[in-house]
Amino acid sequence: MNIQLVYNLIILMVLRNTRAKVEEHKISDEEHFHKDGKHDTSYDHDAFLGKGHGHDFDGLEPQEAKRRLREMLKKVDTDKDGFISFEELRDWVDKQRISYMWETLDTNIRQNDDDHDGLITWIEYKHSQFGKWEDAETEIDAKLQARINKSEKKFKLADTNGDGKLSRDEFAFFRHPEESRDEKLQDIAVDEVIDDMDQNGDRKIDQEEFLGQYVDDANNPPDWVLEDRKHFRDKLDKNKNGMLEREEMKAWVLPNRDDTLKETKHLIADADDNEDGRLSFDEVVDHFQTFVGSTATDHGQALRDEL
Ligand SMILES: *[C@@H]1O[C@H](CO)[C@@H](O)[C@H](O)[C@H]1NC(C)=O
């Protein structure tokens, strides 16, 4: 293979990956409804079991899938009244949406937590993030100092009980301020993304800045560039002025909780046989294919389709 071509491909891949972008915590990477309007249960399974875990029940016999589902419902039913309310299901779906974020976070906590007490102090974080030199002796340049200061400010905001240490939950909002309900942390999340993408310092993101360092090849742009441009034009740039202003950036950076609400309504509507607005465990189990699925039944369905 042509060395130059390989080289170019690698550069493109690197640019693609270093391009500033928000890690979106979506319910699922699956489409909920296909273009023809056909409903995809994989989306619902991801919503209930966690993104990327929607197929966990696939190999199970229906009876086993139902048994495990019933066990899970005990966790969903946080007030232990034997019913799944709208709020309980909404909170569960929202928790699943960020479940894979926790996997990375827990690894992160283990890496930063020098004294293994499960809490991250500012010094522990600073050492792991910026190196273990001692302040007095080392001349640090102003840019680095500014970054450290910013990070410390965010640390203090995330430390909601003010004990100087971040618990697992506090650390989550420190690393993912966009998931926080605290407006100051949300503002930091938006600012961080703007800082990353804004090249000319006007605090607005135009399409080129949005695409990062990708060098335009008008004749043959790769698919991801076409997709990103379309997304920018159709979805993000609401006032169609070719720029993303702060409010538009905010709408992009902060998680879309509308999806969680829609999905919760959808799941309840699907299983609420007696239409009392909440789900009994039996109603959920009767509709287990909506929530967790199982290949055994898919297989049965396939057989029926064939006949
Ligand atoms: C960082 O914070 C320290 C102490 O709060 C302050 O003295 C210093 O000027 C700040 N440095 C920069 C570069 O922002």
Image (tube, rainbow, N blue to C red):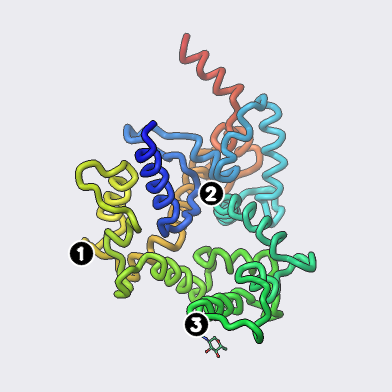
Q: Are marks 3 and 2 in contact (CB under 8 Å)?
A: no
Q: Which residue is mark 2?
A: 277
Neighbour tally class for label 3: few under 14, some 14-19, many 20 plus, Cα within 10 Å:
few
Q: Which residue is mark 1?
A: 241
Q: Residue 58 sits in which quadrant?
A: top right
Q: What residue sits 53% from the left and 67% below the top?
A: 177
For label 3, being within 8 Å of ligand 1 is answered: yes
Q: Which residue is mark 3?
A: 142
Closer to viewer: mark 2 or mark 1? 1
Q: What residue sits 31% from the left and 58% below the top?
A: 236
Q: What residue sits 59% from the left and 54% below the top?
A: 101
Label 3, secondary structure: give it: helix
Closer to viewer: mark 3 or mark 2? 3
For label 1, being within 8 Å of ligand 1 is answered: no
Neighbour tally class for label 1: few under 14, some 14-19, many 20 plus, Cα within 10 Å:
few
Q: Residue 107 sits in which quadrant?
A: bottom right
Label 1, secondary structure: give it: loop
x and y, in percent, of residue 139 in the image: 58, 83
Amino acid marked by disc 1: Asn
